[in-house]
Amino acid sequence: MQNTFTSLKDKIVKRYTVNDENFDQIKSTNINVLLNRVSVNKRKEFQKKILFTAATSLGAVLFGVLIF
């Protein structure tokens, strides 16, 4: 019974301890990847704006045709 509690305790402790391996690695980012992501996001946002404008314009025209 004691062995079960110690193994459970070890599992819980392992969950909340930090591995030193993660801190030794040097993290780097490529600026070109970040800039490309920004440009892709701008393009997608522009396309969404155009689509929304077209949809609302079409809705207004259809509403005007049905009323008059």
Image: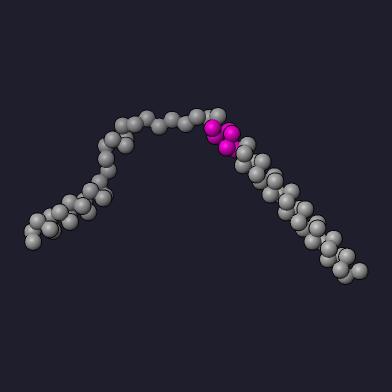
Name the residue rendered at 77%, 53% in the picture: 54
Please, is residue 4 above or below residue 33 in the view? below
Tell me where residue 5 appears, x and y as whole percent: 13, 58
Relative side of 47 to 35, left or right: right
Name the residue rendered at 65%, 41% in the picture: 42
Dividing the picture into quadrants, the one containing residue 59 is bottom right
Dividing the picture into quadrants, the one containing residue 1 is bottom left
Q: Which residue occupies the extreme left position in the image?
A: 2
Relative side of 6 to 23, left or right: left
Tell me where residue 31 appears, x and y as whole percent: 53, 30
Please, is residue 60 above or below residue 31 in the view? below
Task: Count how many numbered circles sit on residues in the image.
Answer: 0
Relative side of 32 to 6, left or right: right
Q: Which residue occupies the extreme right position in the image?
A: 68
Q: Is residue 58 magenta?
A: no
Q: Label the magenta part by its dominant secondary structure.
A: helix
Name the residue rendered at 57%, 37% in the picture: 37
Q: Is residue 37 magenta?
A: yes
Quadrant holding the C terminus = bottom right
Name the residue rendered at 63%, 36% in the picture: 39
Please, is residue 31 above or below residue 40 in the view? above
First to last magenta residue range: 33-38
Tell me where residue 6 appears, x and y as whole percent: 12, 55
Q: How is the image coloured?
A: one colour
Tell me where residue 47 appears, x and y as whole percent: 70, 46
